[in-house]
Image: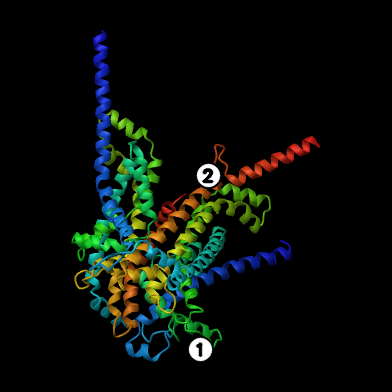
Amino acid sequence: MDEHRVKRRRAFRQRLVSQRSQQLFTVFVFLLIPLTLLGVFTYFPFAKMAQFSLYDMRYIGKRTFVGLRNYLDIFTREELFRTLRLSFYYLAASFVQLALALFFASVLSFKVRAAGIFKGIIFFPFLVSGIAIGFIFKFFFTRGFVLDTLLIFMGFEQSQLPYWLRDSQVNNIMLAATSVWRYMGQNMVLFIGAIMSVDPQLYESAEMDGANTWRKFLNIILPSIQTIIVLNMILSITGSISAFEPPYVITNGTFGTGTYFVVMNSMAHEKQKVGLAAAMAIVLMAIIVLVTAIQKIIVKVFFEEDKNGMIFSERRAMKKRLAKKRKEASA
Amino acid sequence: MNPKKLISSIAAAALKYVSLLLAVFAALYPLLSIVVTAFKSPEEYASTNVMTLPASWLYFDNFIQAWTKAKMGLAFFNSGIILLFVLAGSIMLSSMTAYALNRFSFFANQIVRNLFLFASLIPGVAMQVTVYQIMYSLHLINSLHGYIILLLGTDVISIYIFLQFFETLPKSLDESAIIDGSTYFGVFFKILFPLLQPAVVTCMILKGVATYNEYYMANMYLQDKNRFPVVATSLYTFTGPLGNQYNFICAGVIITIIPALIIFVAGQKQIYAGLANGAVKG
């Protein structure tokens, strides 16, 4: 009897053990290729880059160890450091982009004729490849071409108009604008998705209460997408620091449009200052990791639901209401 | 309705449609310019304003020239192969990774997750400073399979899409299959994988668009443009010492956009849903 129980327990334990080893085997097999790829194409090159950043070197030939001089160069050499300032153009553009996306998402979430067609057309630029965008806007901004034709039609003189891609007063603004053209529709589609996930009953009851469009926007639409807006605002910080495509495909960084990333790219592949390029890459990554960490903290504090399903602003409103009630009760 | 309210509602409607029409114009005007130019003969292009409509909408010479000069037949073939392998590979690898990370606790689980998270923060362009050397020493430059492996090796977004989706699949599915004597491989391939379909669609859309449009690494690692043109890089053919030949470029750009346009019109709903699912949350 007793022996029987021991046997059964042993069999059970054996099954557990074999199950556990089967689990670990599965994990091993399933992760083998992805982790190998991750090591070869991300972490090994990353380690190499950290090493290169301490050298004065080209891809081939003699290497000289220079310690942290490459890093010092980034912050002290004016022509490198000023490229970071161009990020502000892209940051401003991405806020314009978010505002426009929010506006059109709200408009399209009310009753609109042919809403699907409007949405589709505004979204479509997102599907055009970066290289095609480069050609389209080189053509667009050429003197006397697409943009100038439109402006002359509107009453400007050709002589009043600047060279859009050469004049350093306007060229960075124009490049950042192309990125608004490309990504606004995508932002809008994300916002519409978030707005649609709101319970339609909320709109109906707001309608019955006689709420006007502005009220509906403030009380229903905005709360439903505030998390995604804040996330996008933070993402646009890292996005604008690493702005690359518009100047790379349209002007190739000429006439003062070289962003940090474009300059890093040309240091690495044209001028072959590999050490400096590696240091630039590492500095950029450090900034991105920092911003992402801040983002995580903000999301955790302000947008994580507590056990009652409330986020920060709702908890605060609740507290205020309770305090008010208590005051009234005591008075 | 009182007159005041009527006026304000008409004004609101006008504002709504005028702003939408402006946005549509802004989205289409740059694209319209290349359509117009693609249908003009070189003489016509030289003698008219860029926005003047072409004399004939049946002048296809630029398209034929663009197709042959840029080897676009071969480019579409190469891009097709790349898409096929990258999509199949990335769906398999990332769904397997997500399964392992979501369903099993093991000592390095959180470490592996963080390794992928950190990798997702690194911009691809920054890595090319040293990835080039690695590709070179592995003899992966100028080969389609090398480029495919590189695209698979730097794919983190798909893992996140599948990780999110696995959260929604109850573990009781796995457990009952295990009790019925299935192996973990069996659970994944026979039971869970068929249920992943929505995530597979999302992944195909996001990864598909990104792969079809990728030109930076294609330009760097598929240098032999005679043997390995892809759709995105085939447009480089028309730039060079002779300056930009815009008739051909515009026709070429339109050719590269058409497949995206067809897929978009056919699968609009899935694309929107895919984007919404793929938006990284937190």
How far apart marks 1 and 2 lie (CA) works out to: 54 Å
The residue indicated by pointer 2 is A304
Is label 1 or label 2 in front?
Answer: 2
Q: Is residue B127 left or right of residue B147?
A: right
Q: Mark 1–mark 2 contact, CB under 8 Å?
A: no
Q: Amino acid at mark 2?
A: Glu
Query: Closest to the observer: B58 or A58?
Result: A58
Query: Closest to the observer: A143 or A259?
Result: A259
Residue sitting at x 47%, y 74%? A172
Chain letter belonging to callout 2: A
Quadrant of image for the N terminus of chain A = top left
Q: Is residue A162 left or right of residue A59?
A: right
- Identify the image quadrant of residue B127: bottom left
Q: Indicate the position of residue A57 as horizontal and vertical percent values.
A: 29, 67
Q: Indicate the position of residue A78 as horizontal and vertical percent values.
A: 45, 72
Residue sitting at x 24%, y 28%? A18
Judge whether A43 appears above or below A149 on screen: above
The residue indicated by pointer 1 is A158
Quadrant of image for the C terminus of chain A = top right
Chain letter belonging to callout 1: A
How many discs mark residues in the rendered view?
2
- Identify the image quadrant of residue A269: bottom left
Mark 2 element type? loop
- Mark 2, residues whose alpha carbon is within 10 Å: few (<14), some, or many (≥20)? some
Mark 1 and mark 2 lie on one chain; the one further toward the N terminus is: 1
